[in-house]
Image (cartoon, helix red, strand yellow):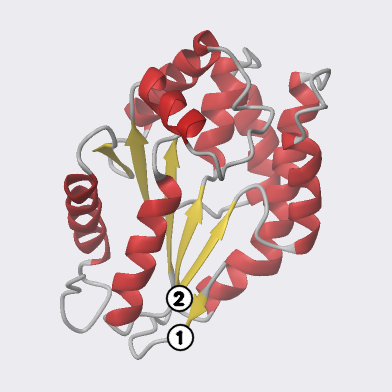
Amino acid sequence: MTTRLGAFALKSGRFITIEGGEGAGKTTLIQELEQRMSASGIAVVTTREPGGIAIAEQIRGVILDSRNTSMDGRTEALLYAAARRQHLVEKVIPALEQGAVVICDRFIDSSLAYQGFARGLGMEAVWEINRFAIGDTMPDLTLWMDIEPEEGLKRIHKDDARELNRLDLEGLKFHKKVRAGYEQVYGQYPNRIVRINAGAEPNVVAQQAIAAVEHGLKGFFATDVKL
């Protein structure tokens, strides 16, 4: 994960999260945004969940280990929340306090969609677990990389370099529930979440995302940001 300190650090940073199902192209988009922000002189930190720092990466290993098929849904939700808490206090919040734009691959919306809806734990129950973990820290902007589950799974199975994790091995029915969960979250937070058609051509996806980020950061710099 990368930290770039540029010429236009904010007095108070901005938190951008990238969400979506498996194979949506989140990693590619984050790399594109990081490069463009750095080139524009913006202080940017990229990171991921679960992970981003040593303790959270260790928890990630437990969560995504394909051998841990017996993991209970509540255990999964609690592990995600624990990793999220440590990641926030150790990396995200300090970067925001230094005025950086933090771009994170997944955050609380993933827990609501995956554990709350797809696992059937209930969005309200999962929200309460995470409210304790995150306190008042919520994203300023979320890009939801929306893709048909069939297409997303096709992408990840084509990628020979990618190691399949426990969630990748779930059936199509589960991934369709994840997408339905994101639909519900999107409906609850339409002012924060921008829906991106992740099934479009890569240049179109990038254009959608860049426009959303430029609009989301508007007013936080002395001049409008052009990425």
Label 2 environment density (alpha carbons within 10 Å; few <14, some 14–19, many ≥20)? many
Does residue 41 appear to the left or right of 133 in the view shown?
Answer: left
Say if residue 39 shows up in the picture. Answer: yes
Residue 223 percent across, percent down from the top left: 16, 81
Label 1 environment density (alpha carbons within 10 Å; few <14, some 14–19, many ≥20)? some
Image quadrant for the N terminus? bottom right
Q: Is residue 96 above or below residue 66?
A: below
* Residue type pointed to by label 1: Leu
Residue nearest the viewer, comparing 32 with 108? 32
Q: Residue at x 46, y 32 (%)?
A: 158
Q: Residue at x 57, y 42 (%)?
A: 162
Which circle marks residue 112 in the picture? none
From the viewer's perspective, is the residue at label 2 or at label 1 nearer? 1
Q: Decide: marks 2, 1 in contact (CB < 8 A)?
A: yes
Q: Is residue 161 above or below residue 21?
A: below
Does residue 26 appear to the left or right of 212 in the view shown?
Answer: right
Residue 132's image quarter?
top right
* Residue marked by disc 1: 5
Residue occupying the far front of the picture: 160
Say if residue 21 shows up in the picture. Answer: no
Residue occupying the far top of the picture: 173
Residue 185 percent across, percent down from the top left: 42, 28
Image quadrant for the C terminus? bottom left
Disc 2 from disc 1: Cα separation: 8 Å
Does label 2 or label 1 sit earlier along the sequence? Answer: 1
Q: Residue at x 29, y 36 (%)?
A: 198
Secondary structure under tag 2 reads loop
Secondary structure under tag 1 reads loop
* Residue marked by disc 2: 100
* Residue type pointed to by label 2: Ala
Residue nearest the viewer, comparing 169 with 76? 169
